[in-house]
Amino acid sequence: MAKRSVWGAIGGCVAACAAFGQDTPRLVEHAIGVTPTRIAPAVYAGHRAQRVGDWLEYQPGHGWGDPVFDCYGDWDRDGVPDGADWCGLGAARWYLGSGFCNLFVTNDMTLPFGTMSDDGLYRLDLAWYWTAWGPSTTEQCVIGVFTQDSMPCEPDSLDYAGWLIDFGTLAGCPAGYYHASLDLSGTGSWPIRWEASGSYVIAFLTNDGEEFASCAQPMLWGTGDATGDFVAPGTQGPNQFDEVYFSDGFHDEYECRDYALGVCPDPLGAMLRFWGTLCCAPCHIVNCNWDNSIDTTDFLCYLNLWAVSDPDADLNNDDIVNVRDFIWFLDVWAECR
């Protein structure tokens, strides 16, 4: 089967749907839950997703684990974006207009101290807007999710295998956005680097994952707000790779975009939550002076250890006391206060 011109598909989609400016986020209020029908192991190589195993019927496992990266916003952990958040937007989430197409996305993530890298990430929640060819059209929706070692706006390293997730045929330009929860605890996982940082890759595909979809984009949320009132598990920065200029399945330096757009939460990022395993309570780790409360005295206690490169300040166990340890301490300390 001849491969479709992704650039031509995007042009047709934009003509079919109302488009907004690429840097003008708009809200979508209605969340539409969908369930995958099947999954398959895959790698991203040669500028495309490539299946490396058979399609398997999706059968969720029974492992919840711990949310270790949350750019999704689900306070009660039922898989549905909810309103118990600091922005006061309910289940509404941001996107960049129904005619905006972003089929290949990379964003960074740093996971909490104590994340068991050997266990990988085995649950996933994500949300997206599916334009297809426009209103009253349908298209098979396959989403590829991968993890890698690259940091924000470094060239993609595409280190690890991931999964293709087949949601069947979905209607384009729906009156809301699609969201889904995926549990691979009985099947596999997404591997992560031992430092529990790097980035994730999302590809919006069709034709059993063999080509890019006509038009889609990730919904947008964030891991914390600008004032520090609440920080979700894991952190991310403002930069994201977007495939919006030339849809060739490859990110170049011109596709690195700043998502500090002045809305809540800020910055925004591709909407996704990973679940994994935490080896111990992070709040216990940052209780530096062992007084059973997390406050400024713990910060000063750790700062004194870190300043002299005390081995107890090596929070990521890499035998080096450096800025990574300090940032991890700050992230957990801010969350546990």
Image (spheres, rainbow, N blue to C red):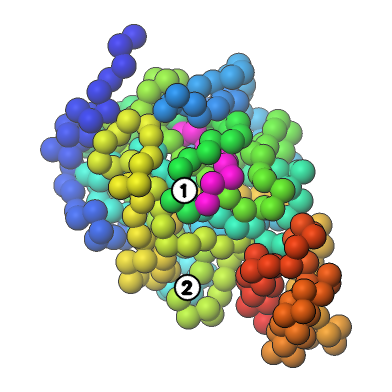
> How far from the left and from the top, in percent, is residue 26?
28, 60
The CA distance from mark 1 to mark 2 is 25 Å
Q: Residue at x 36, y 61 (%)?
A: 259
Q: Main secondary structure of the magenta part?
A: strand
Report whether 108 appears left or right of 123: left
Task: Give me the residue at 35% from left, 47% from top.
Answer: 253
* Closer to the camera in the image, 75 or 218: 218
Q: Which residues are magenta?
A: 143-151
- Quick one: SS at disc 2? loop
| Whether residue 140 can be seen here | no
Q: Residues within 10 Å of mark 2 (few under 14, many from 20)?
A: some
Please state which of residues 327 and 43 is positioned toward the viewer in this rendering: 327
Q: Check the image and report above or below for 229 versus 176.
A: below
Q: Position of residue 280 (x, y in %)?
A: 82, 62
Residue count near mark 1 (Cα–Cα under 10 Å), binned few <14, some 14–19, many ≥20: some
Q: Is residue 144 magenta?
A: yes
The amino acid on which the numbered mark 2 sits, given as a three-letter code, is: Asp
| Residue 322 position (above or below residue 254) | below
The residue beneath circle 2 is 225
Which quadrant would residue 92 be assigned to in this image? bottom left
Mark 1 vs mark 2, foreground winner is 1
